[in-house]
Each structure stands twice: as structure tokens, then as C-alpha cells.
Image (cartoon, rainbow, N blue to C red):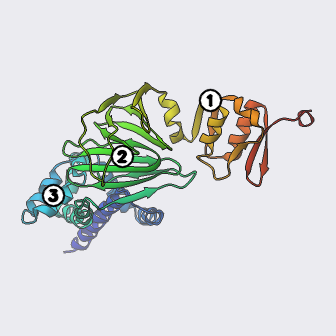
Amino acid sequence: MGKEPNTNRAEKVNADALEWHVRLHGGSASGDDWTTFTQWLEADPAHNEAYDIIALAWDDVGSLSEVIVRDHADTPELASNVIAFPLHQLRKAVSAKPWAFGGSFGAAIAATLLILMAPVFIGQNDVTSETFYATDIGEQRTIILADGSTVMLNTGTSIAVRMDKTTRLIDLQKGEASFTVQHENERSFVVAANTLRVTDIGTRFDVRMDIGRTRVSVTEGIVEVDSLPLENNTLPSSTSKIRLVEGQQAVHQADTVITVQPFDTTKVTAWQQGFLIFENDDLTDVIAELNRYFTNPVYMADVDLADLRFSGILQITDLDRAVRDLTTLLSLSAVETETGIALRHISPANSQ
């Protein structure tokens, strides 16, 4: 009898740990959620241990989905909605600490998942249900989707996510995003950007939208690209797909065919490490790229500066440093004005 309160408390802690993991990795956790989670971890060492077990479990499983199907055979729609969540990723902890998943705690996990995830996937079975994510100028954000896939949003980017039992559709509405996809045989993973449709075949890739231009760069694995437009938010069938492998990039501009070319992976993905790489690029293009990350624009006050070319690395987390490095390497001056930061030739008076 004396052990029952401790047992109940342990089950409550384990259930709380699972709830936190689902909430934080479902793609919609807020800053307040992370703050509250940190406070929960620090409140009791048992919280840390319980959360570690759940985190280990997230890499590899299978048996818990069978528990849910068995226990909810009378509600197959509810069970299938829950199984759509990546329960297949929960196996490592079961083999490492099987005692943690036995008996009543196993039932508690199933019950907690039913409570937490069923409403999410019931909503996602409605193809019109969407979740939106966005970043401001200069902001970057990593989203972990409910299927375990990761989307890193670059500056000034917005996406809409729709998932159902057969399709995972990401509508890149503007900006740039990098995708690391959790492969599923049952559900395709499709990114729509401008008039391009990118279908993942288990990979990592970057998609960038500019005015009238879309670029798809594959950094690992394979994707298929076609130029058929999406109409009425439905996926069209395609008869002219182009397959891209690692190191290949597809570029599509309005009213043109898709061009496939090699690309520099380090250069394309440098923004994910907080900098940009330029190699003999026009200063006009360098400034345009830099201005994607800052609200205080840089511009050329002297017209002939457009003839300059630049090679170097610029940070995108510190405008002052980026401008200082740019002007130093090109022997220019930078002056703060009411409209931004003006680049000029260094006058003879200032060079002495």
C-alpha cells in the first residue's frame, strides 16, 4: 500500500514527459512552452530521467502502435489517426529499458498519445486543414513536423503545411526553406513553390523562391521535380518529371523549361550556419542577397560601383560587421543615411 502513491507519481511523471515530447516536437511549440518545459525539467531530477527515456524512444519503435490498435479496435478511425504520428520511431528505449514500457505505463503512453495526437490527425484528415509557419526579415526557424521531418525556414519565409493519410504537402509561399524528410512508403512528401512541384524520395534539399524564379538544390538523396502548377490546392498528375540527385540543382523561371545544373553545396546552405559565400559575384547581387537579412538596406550611392565584383564571406547575424567586411575587401566607405547604408568610393580626403 505504501508504494502505491510513489507508483502513481512515477506514472504521472512519465506521462508528463511524453506529453512534453509530443508538444515540443509537433511543430507548433511556442517560446512560452519551451520556458515552461525548462522549468518542469529543473523542478525534479525524476523529470529529466523520464524525459530521457522518451527522447531515446523517439528514434525507433513499433510495438506501441499495436497496443493502440488492439486497445481501440472498436474505433479504427481514431487508432489510425494516432498511428499516423511517428510511432514507428519509438524502439530504442523499449530495448534499452524494457521495464519502462511494461504494465500500466505502456497503457499510460497509449492513452496519452490518444489524448494528444488524435485531435491533430483528425483535423489533418480534412485536406483543407492547414498549419502556417513564418519568419520575419533576419529570422530563422526550425520546425519539426508531426511526421518527424524537419523544415528550416530562412529569412522572410512562410509555409503552409497540410497532412492527411496519403500526402504531406508543404506550400512554400515565399522565401527559402531547407527540408530533411522522414521517408514514409505510405505518404508522399511534396513541396509546392511557384509553379514547381518537388516530390521527395528520401533526402535533404533546399527550395528558394524569388520573383519569377524557383531553385531546388539537392544536398542528399533524390527528388523529382516537375513544372505543372497546383490548382485549387490539389496535387496534379505529372508526365514530365525530372529526377535530381545529390549535387544537382533545378532552376525554373516563368515561361521557361527547367534547367538542371551542378551547384556548390557549401554556398547554397551557408545561410544555415549564419553566413553567405560569394565568389566573383556582381556587387549588385551581393547587396540584394545581403538585404534579404536586414531591415536597414545597403545601397550603392555611386553608380559605377555596379561594375565591381566581390568574393568573400559575410555574416548575416550582424549588419555592421557584414558592411565592414564588405567595404574593407572592396576599399569602399559606408555612410549611414535616412534611407539606409550608402556605399561610396573612398574620397582622397578620407584616404589620407
For the C terminus, which image quadrant? top right
Q: Which amino acid does label 1 sit on?
A: Asp
Q: Nearer the viewer, residue 240 or 250?
A: 240
Instruction: Please state the total of marks drawn on the protein image.
Output: 3
Report how far apart the C-alphas of labels 3 and 2 lie in the structure.
Answer: 27 Å
**Residue 264 image offset from top left, x and y in percent:** 49, 27
Image coordinates for residue 302, horizontal then vertical, percent: 78, 38
Q: Name the residue under label 2.
A: 192
Mark sitting earlier along the chain (3/2)? 3
- Residue at numbered disc 1: 281
**Which residue is rendered at x = 44% and y = 63% of the image?**
30
Residue 233 position (above or below residue 5): above
Residue lying furthest left in this view? 74
Say which of marks 3 and 2 sits in front: 2
Q: What element carries label 2?
A: strand
Residue 322 position (above or below residue 9): above
Res 44 quadrant in image:
bottom left
Left/right placement of residue 237 relative to residue 21 reads left
x and y, in percent, of residue 190 in the image: 31, 44
Indicate the amino acid at tag 3.
Answer: Ser
Name the residue rendered at 71%, 41% in the picture.
Answer: 323
Q: What residue type is labelled 2?
A: Ala
Point out which mark residue 80 bears.
3
In the rendered view, tell whether residue 66 sits above or below residue 298.
below
Which secondary structure, mark 1?
A: strand
Q: Marks 2/1: CA distance? A: 29 Å
| Image position of 199 (left or right of 84) | right
